Amino acid sequence: MNEMFFDIISWLGLALCIGAFFVKDMIKLRLVTFTGCLCLGVYYTHIDVVQGMISNVIILAINGAYLFKFKFNKLFKRGKTRLEDELEYS
């Protein structure tokens, strides 16, 4: 593919990862970070940087696990109070 395409992907990933510092909602934070790391992972795979690939795979796995946990708990919510929910996700 075109080198410019991968440069755009890397800048998009970088912007998303930096922008995640300004997200207050935990689920949105995980989604933005997941998307940014996915973009950077594609870029690092293209330029063959092993350290970048490994670090992004680890961060993707962590964020993916938390997103799955959020979704799973939302589907099968046991009558918890809002305070218990906030304590669990903090």
Image (cartoon, rainbow, N blue to C red):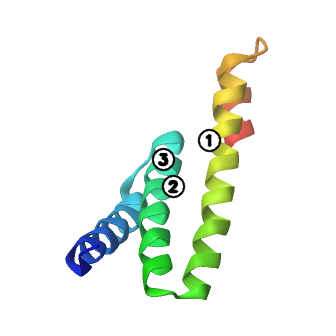
Residue 34's label in the rendered image is: 2
Q: Position of residue 28 (x, y in %)?
A: 45, 43
Relative to residue 51, is residue 69 depicted above or below?
above
Which residue in the structure is indicated by mark 1? 67
Which residue occupies 65% across, 34% down? 70
The answer to whether residue 2 is seen in the rendering is yes
Q: Kindly give the residue lying farthest to the left in the view shown.
A: 4
Q: Position of residue 34 (x, y in %)?
A: 51, 55
In the shown orientation, is residue 72 left or right of residue 36? right
- Disc 2 is placed on an element classified as helix
Q: Which residue is mark 3?
A: 31
Q: Position of residue 65 (x, y in %)?
A: 70, 47
| Crowdedness near tag 3: few (<14), some (14–19) or many (≥20) residues, C-alpha within 10 Å | some
Residue found 48% across the figure and 58% down from its top: 33
Q: The residue tagged with tag 3: helix, strand or loop? A: helix
C-beta proximity under 8 Å, tags 1 and 3: yes
Q: Is residue 70 left or right of residue 21?
A: right
Kind of residue sitting beneath label 2? Phe
- Up the image or down, 15 lies above or below 86; here it is below
* Mark 3: amino acid: Leu
Labelled pair 1, 2 in contact (Cβ < 8 Å)? yes
**Residue at image location 20% in from the left, 77% down from the top:** 4
Count the numbered circles shown. Answer: 3
